[in-house]
Amino acid sequence: MSIIEDPNKKTPQVDLSKLTEKLQQSALDSAETKLDQATQGIREEVKKVQETASRVQNKLTRVNEELSPIKGNTFEIIPPEVLEKQKALSSLVTYGGDLKSLYGDSHLVWSTVQIGGEYVLTDSHFTLSIHQQVGTHDSFEILCPSEAFGEKDSYPLTNTRKYLGKRCTLQLKQYGQTTYIFTGIITQIRNKRIDGYSHIILEGKSPTILLENGLDCQSFEKKGLKEIIEESTREYPSDLIQWDIRPHLQEKLLYTVQYRESDYQFIRRLATRYGEWFYYNGTQLVFGGYGGKTVELVEEQDLFEYELKMQLVPQKFTYTSYDAKQAENYTVESESVSVQGTKNPFQQYAEEASAKTYNKVPLSLYNQSLMESGRMELTSAVKRQKQSRQNVFYLEAKTHNPNIRLGDIVKLKAWMPGHEIFKNGEVPLESYRIIEITHNYEGMEGYHNFIVGVPKEIETPPYMEEDAIPQCEEQSATVMDNNDPEGMSRIRVQFLWQKPFNGMTPWIRSITPYAGSGKGMHVVPEIGEEVIVSFENGNAEKPVSLGAMFNGKGKSGHGGKGNYKKGLQTASGCHVLFNDKKGSMDLADKGNSNLFFDGSGNSTINTSVTQVINVGDNSCLLKMDSGGNITLDGKSSLKITIGASSLSMDSGGKITLKGKDITIEDDGETKISALKDITIDSSQKISAHAVSDAKISTDADLNLEGEKSTLKGDSLTDIKAALVKINS
């Protein structure tokens, strides 16, 4: 086989123009197929719009036919049945007709209104506005023609007044699905003439308005925020107020007071004071919580108008506080406490700029509680305040996405076709927590909302305020306990408004004229007595007793005309009484023993049973009793001296009696005896005289000696002995 090509053989020719044409046609067919597939949904939506337009056009044609001039007398009154038919058709077209049939499953947003379980305004035009903001009551307003409720020819509010106080459920719908639900209470109904036409305005609030049922007083001891809220709202219907309570602060609070506040004001103040999120998301009342669902917002699709706003807020500060229980002062600087950072670059820049701009570090007194937890409580307060000052950056935007609720997280996405990483052109940006939203629905004119958000990492709402304390005025209370376990002379009291639930304060301090370590005046009111109580900084959670008070059932019984009597008397009857008229003073106990000073320089000690004067550990003792017994006892010696006379005794048994003249007299018999010698010695004379007999005797020798001795008897001298010796 030859591999040499035959030069005479013809090579077939290819028509390049036809090939190109085929390729182009094939590419075109493929493109049309893909385009047809891509635009299928759009064509379906266009078809629905065309069908809707066709229905509207048909209705307009019917209206034109009905509204054509009536032949005959131009001054003839239109028959009532014709007029009603014309107006019914006019209302149907002008105000949208049956919303469900008009919008159905389309991309257009529409709304339903349900009042007291009944759907209303299903075939009437109306406008709807719902405004929500964290830390406040939400509100809504519905505006519609009065004929929508059949009140065109009736007396105003005849048919609509029944809706006052009823539950109202508002829904936003898109693509046949419910995107948003808001349940509230109709609080006001108005009939208003606008541009010559009568309109009905239904205004309402979120169910939080039910918590505004009047001013209340109650207290909670050693309970957490969740338990406090559950107890204070347990009387409300759960079908209207559904809670989601997940506070960040989990510690139990020593003493929490609701004083002359509605339940809503009380709970909102707790959220404000402790930096907790508090809002109604349309179906639940949220306290604390950790955010709602996440909704994506794409530029040029959901988001057309927006504003980013940053501001300066001082970041550095120092708190100082006093712990009375430990008698300690604490100081905590903001820079020593760490908080969660944020990924938002705008937020970071605003915080850094604020820290650089405000250089001074101010010192502030934290005096909002009893500080039973000491430094730990102060550190928590500094952390909350520091988190609150992170609110330096905000997002404000107008969107057409009906899925957003208050408290939800919106995730922004930029529209960048051809992006290398995000092929669908949706580039993720920052995320924000919604703190305010206004929904606006205007029937045929469409739907939009306005939102305000903060970076999602922000843990504390912008309304946080440490000074959100319950303000209270001085008032009386009853002492419930005075046995202070810490020995600080504190008492526990019960205010009049605490009696229904048997509440009381924790241990509170009392004012005293003199106090200190190892010294002071300890006069604590008795249990059951009335005291007047004040409050540090007007804070109902920091009571302090100013002292006890007399009342109609507890009178002093002292004073006298001219107020000359003053004194102190205890519950047992012990007293110290002063009489300014006499200048006297009486100190007495309940057994009627007293020490009385009469004001003239005289004093008297009276006892009903026994009087004892003791020095040392019974080293010197004088005891007298009602039996007439007197005991005078000294461990070492006793000496009584009056001028030149004295009587002394010592512990060795020696007794010495001295005096210029000493006389011993006895109405009966006088005996002097001793176990040893008795010596009678005188520098002059010794005389012994007896009216009757005088006898000197001894069991041994009797010696009578003297320089000169005389033995004399006036009648007889008798000397007898077994042996008598004279001058021997």
Image (cartoon, grey):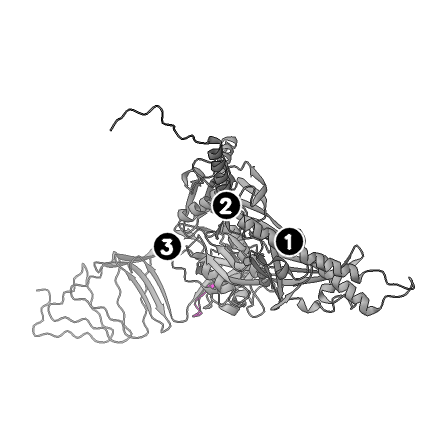
Is residue 638 found inside the magenta-colored segment of the image?
no
Q: Residues at badges 3 and 1 in contact (C-beta under 8 Å)?
A: no
Looking at the image, can residue 464 be seen? no
Could you say where residue 470 lies in the image, as x and y percent from the top left? 55, 55
Q: What residue type is labelled 2?
A: Thr
At label 3, counting other C-alpha atoms closer than 10 Å, the crowd grade (few under 14, some 14-19, many 20 or more) is: few
At label 1, counting other C-alpha atoms closer than 10 Å, the crowd grade (few under 14, some 14-19, many 20 or more) is: few
Looking at the image, tell me whether mark 3 or mark 1 is earlier in sequence order: 1
Residue annotated with mark 2 = 33
| Element carrying mark 1 | helix
Spatial distance from mark 3 to mark 1, Cα to Cα? 138 Å
Q: In which quarter of the image is the C terminus?
A: bottom left
Residue annotated with mark 3 = 643
Res. 710 image quadrant: bottom left
Instruction: Give whichever of 311, 132 is nearer the camera.
Output: 132
Is residue 587 found inside the magenta-colored segment of the image?
yes
At label 2, counting other C-alpha atoms closer than 10 Å, the crowd grade (few under 14, some 14-19, many 20 or more) is: few
In-image side of 175 versus 148 (left or right)? left
Which secondary structure dominates the residues rendered in magenta?
loop
Looking at the image, can residue 29 be seen? yes
Foreground label between 2 and 3: 2
Q: How many marks?
A: 3
Q: Residues at badges 2 and 1 in contact (C-beta under 8 Å)?
A: no
Q: Which amino acid does label 1 sit on?
A: Gln
Residue annotated with mark 1 = 50
Foreground label between 3 and 1: 1
> At 12% from the left edge and 75% from the top edge, which residue is drawn?
720
What's the magenta region? 586-593
Could you say where residue 336 lies in the image, as x and y percent from the top left? 41, 39
Spatial distance from mark 2 to mark 3, Cα to Cα? 144 Å
Looking at the image, tell me whether mark 2 or mark 3 is earlier in sequence order: 2
